[in-house]
Amino acid sequence: SYGSVFKALHKESGQVLAIKQVPVDSDLQEIIKEISIMQQCDSPWIVKYYGSYFKNTDLWIVMEYCGAGSVSDIMRLCKKTLTEDEIATILCDALKGLEYLHLRRKIHRDIKAGNILLNMEGHAKLADFGVAGQLTDTMAQRNTMIGTPFWMAPEVIQEIGYDCAVDIWSLGITALEMAEGKPPYGDIHPMRAIFMIPTKPPPSFRQPDKWSPEFIDFVRNAKQPNILCQMILEAREIRENQIQWNNAGKKRGHCQGMVG
């Protein structure tokens, strides 16, 4: 979300940290929401929050440092898309992060390569909770259009009520982004994409022959919410039944190669 991010060193422990500097004239409600969500999370698959403080006219948020940056940063710097093994490893970690959130009835609502960070060991972590939402027991669905248009699920755009399955749709779009360098409709104006996403069939690979049938099935299933909407079990079902195509958890070396 808003602000600049700096690398810092904690003198007493020697731990390297990331500090996000946010002007207080930014959307404070969004910033406070991001801090609140991060405070409640304790998972190796989600960027850790260590504290925050005001200095002059800025709010400084102290977070876990992920030295390799975001997946989109890596793709841009390397000027190439990712291999299927690299994508599988990142998706496996991202699904673990989503499972953690969804079991606690939280929706991220802005899953994309730019919000998945990698540390120097090649582990992927979910970040940027500025638009995350909480599902309460009395409100099983939300109906506000929040997120980044190209990655939005149709029901988010249509504001017809949605649940945690929208994160899985966005992860499927992110898989296409990592494979092809940009999300579907990435070449057109965002407002036009908002009209196209709910009216067109779910997007798929432009060159399906490049990818395994298992990967294609994973992306297809991620964009069929009816398959996934058994309360908060979507991430677990996909992770156990689909992501195994590459034994992704055993292929950490692929992502270590990316960040080394």
Image (cartoon, rainbow, N blue to C red):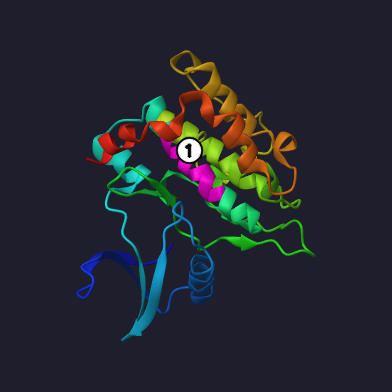
- Occupied quadrant, residue 182: top left
- The 10 Å Cα crowd at callout 1, few under 14, some 14 to 19, many 20 or more, is many
- Front-most of residues 219 and 93: 93
Magenta: main secondary structure equals helix
Q: Is residue 121 above or below residue 202?
A: below
Q: Residue furthest top?
A: 209
Q: Is residue 192 visible?
A: no
Mark 1 sits on what residue?
91
- Front-most of residues 191 and 19: 19
- Front-most of residues 202 and 128: 128
Where is residue 246 shown, x and y percent of the image?
46, 25
Q: Is residue 60 magenta?
A: no
| Residue that appears at 48% across and 38% down | 92
- Occupied quadrant, residue 51: bottom left
Q: Is residue 48 above or below residue 23?
A: above
| Residue that appears at 76% across and 51% down | 160
Q: How many marks?
A: 1
* Amino acid type, mark 1: Leu
Where is residue 179 shown, x and y percent of the image?
42, 29
Where is residue 171 shown, x and y percent of the image?
54, 40
Quarter of the rendering occupied by the C terminus: top left
- Occupied quadrant, residue 12: bottom left
Segment tinted magenta in the rendering: 88-98
Q: Is residue 27 visible?
A: yes
Quarter of the rendering occupied by the N terminus: bottom left
| Residue that appears at 71% across and 48% down | 158
Image position of 143 (left or right of 21): right
